[in-house]
Amino acid sequence: MSTFKAPKGTYDLLPPDSAKYLAVREAIAAPLRGSGYGYIETPGFENVELFARGVGESTDIVTKEMYVFETKGGDRLALRPETTAPVLRAVLEANLHKAGNLPVKVWYSGSQYRYERPQKGRYRHFSQVGAEAIGAEDPALDAELIILADQAYRSLGLSRFRILLNSLGDRECRPVYRAALQDFLRGLDLDEDTLRRAEINPLRVLDDKRPEVQKQLTDAPLLRDYLCDACKAYHEEVRELITAAGVAFEDDPKLVRGLDYYTRTTFEFVHDGLGSQSAVGGGGRYDGLSEMIGGPSLPSVGWALGVDRTVLALEAEGIELDIPAATSVFAVPLGEEARRVLFAKVTELRKNGVAADFAYGGKGLKGAMKNANRSGARYAIVAGERDLADGVVQLKDMESGEQTAIGVNEIVAELESRLG
């Protein structure tokens, strides 16, 4: 047995359970691919400053959770704790925003890394599927992304999730609210770290999950009461568009996201069956992020949905995904000549798009048929010397148990016909 184990707070994806994760990724990505979003992939590590500027130096992610290291060349890099800033960096670096087709609409799938206290639903290595629409300020774009995420979850059969919605205002009205919130927070009995955070970014205090802090925030001023007319109108249009699409949501005036770059629309998908780690995904508009990382003004919006937590949500609802068997045909050769003939037929089946596997290792009939059963294959091809002398193989239906002799040269056509 190996003396090595997966690092604390991480996990391995292994068959057959890994098929569930792949199916979730596919379900989340499918509505995006059908809505003009192209795939993007960025490195697993970036310059530390990208996250310090974009995510926010006062956030827990930057101050406590990033995996930071220095290269032999002296560069300070960080494993990505989130992917919005890297995606925007990549779009700017490749000048996609100058191609004249705004917004730039992209989606990604990949791993993030945060040094957090591990618990169910919270890992130090986790997987997300995300979408970003870069370079346009339009309520319809915000609504589109919320609707597509809802569509993805519905396609998986999920029903016990809720969408929380709020507006964080913009650079015009948020400073007024920020000052009012700071005045309120200074009058509370908070520890030094929280008071220091309140001076840097008071909205982050609203996101504090500690009961002793939340209890004192009951009468905190609400951002919705400070929104300027433009932000009110923008938010109302987002709400109307989502409602018209038949997507239910809840207004949550205390909802803030844990990243500094969010403006105006912010939303979160929560599932009531997951306990304390109830958020399965979220996002919002980040109109100032491009300028924060040295780019031009590019109003943008996006979200990220957690693959790990979505799988937990499926389990909480007792949903079993209809995942087709990885193998449709399993070949069982009995003897060297049968190995040669059936291996060639398995290769031919694969070339014709039929998922096929082979009994490797020279097992006897009993052991090989056990492997065929475990593979989930609908059909098994069995052949020995006597079969081949007659120019046939035995085709067994693994569901009904029916067995039929088929000509060797008819195997591929017969199986293609039966499997549709």
Image: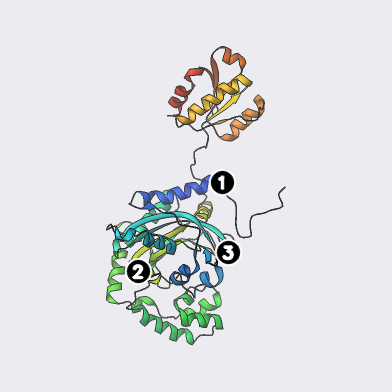
Q: Residues within 10 Å of mark 2 (few under 14, many from 20)?
A: many
Instruction: Give the Cα separation between the discs numbered 3 and 2.
Output: 36 Å
- Numbered circle sitting on residue 17: 1
Mark 2 touches mark 1? (CB < 8 Å): no
The quarter of the picture where the C terminus appears is top left
In this view, the mark in front (3 or 1): 3
Amino acid at the residue labelled 1: Asp
Q: Is residue 2 left or right of residue 286?
A: right
Between 233 and 367, the one nearer to me in the picture? 367
Q: Identify the residue shown where x is 30% and y is 77%.
A: 228
Residue 210 point in image, percent of width and height: 55, 74
Residue 287: assigned label: 2
Question: Where does label 3 land, which residue?
Answer: 72
* 88 sits left or right of 70 in the view: left
Look at the numbered disc 2 and give the secondary structure of its residue: loop
Q: Nearer the viewer, residue 245 or 391?
A: 391
Task: Give the SS element for disc 3.
Answer: loop
Q: Distance between the residues labelled 2 and 1?
A: 39 Å
Q: Residues within 10 Å of mark 3 (few under 14, many from 20)?
A: few
Residue 9, by quadrant, is: bottom right
Q: Is residue 327 left or right of residue 29?
A: right
Q: Which residue is drawn at 53% across and 19% down?
A: 404
Residue 399 vs residue 301, the one in the foreground: 301
Identified by mark 3, the residue type is Lys
Please state the horizontal and vertical placement of residue 71, each as a whole percent of the image: 56, 64
Sequence-wise first label, 3 or 1: 1
**Colour theme:** rainbow
Instruction: Give coordinates of residue 111: x percent, y percent.
Output: 51, 56
Residue type for callout 2? Asp
